[in-house]
Image (spheres, grey):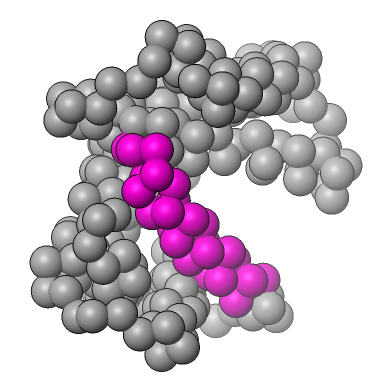
Amino acid sequence: MLAVALATQAVGLLVIGTVLELHPEAFSAVSLGWGALAGLAGAAGVSLLYHALSIGRMGVVSPVTALLAAAVPVIFGIATGERPSPLVYCGLVLAAVAIVAISASFDSSGEREYSTAGLREAVLSGIAFGAFFTLLGMTREGAPLFALLGSRLASVGLLGSIVFATRTSIRAKGALWILVLGGALDMGANILYLLAARIDGLAISAVLTSLYPASTVLLAAIVLRERLSRIQWAGVLFALVAVAMIAAG
């Protein structure tokens, strides 16, 4: 899994390098530095998440990680002066409920999964992802492309060091096109996140970004024919309503 993360991050580095070549912006050491810190936090979050999933249950790890990833930027945004409207606050709370519901998973017998295994790693992973969103958002008024470049350089360097130290195989095994697509989409998502943070601030943008499990479960249902539970369908509905409330506010 670390090799997959490294490959997608490397593709993202190529993508942002290409974008900078086509649309050059003024060099900013500050943005590069904030981006590098964000990249280290993101790489740590990915590593901790994979470790948590390897020893714990997805039904615990996924919602804890997603909620904390959203909570950290919200707390930072409000602490630094962002003041969403009451409707937006209600939408943020509903979005948090949606994240937990969408991330719900069940074992082979249909019982709700619950275990404290991997919980500590999930908490640390969520905080790290939250730090990634916050640090990357610090550059929304500066040079965002250089922030993303710094982020990818740092994350590729850290993940590459871990893969080298653990002697992890980096062979794609016929899935190269998936890694390329994943890396490109990941970088595109980061660019859109920075644009959203510039317009709406960290609190709103981070929570909306953390609703990504909705697209995951819907794709799993459509592409992989996986059956969604009632609580997951309810979570998707909550997510749609939350997005509407936040947008209206």
Residue 13 position within the rendered picture, expressed as x and y whole percent measured from the top left: 40, 78
* Residue at figure coordinates x 31%, y 65% from the top left: 144
Residue 143 occupies quadrant: bottom left
- Residue lying at 48% horizontally and 11% vertically, measured from the top left: 87
**Rendered location of residue 213, percent (x, y):** 60, 37
Q: Does residue 48 lie above or below 205 as drawn?
A: below
Rendered position, 227 above or below 90: below
Residue 99 visible to the viewer: no
Asked where in the image residue 235 lies, by quadrant, the reply is top right
Which portion, as a residue range, is magenta? 178-202
Q: In the current view of this chain or complex, which residue is farthest to the bottom?
A: 21
- Magenta stretch secondary structure, dominant: helix
Report the residue at 42% width, 77% height from top. Answer: 16
Residue at left offset 76%, top offset 43%: 220
Q: Nearer the viewer, residue 214 or 43?
A: 214
Q: Nearer the viewer, residue 230 or 214?
A: 214
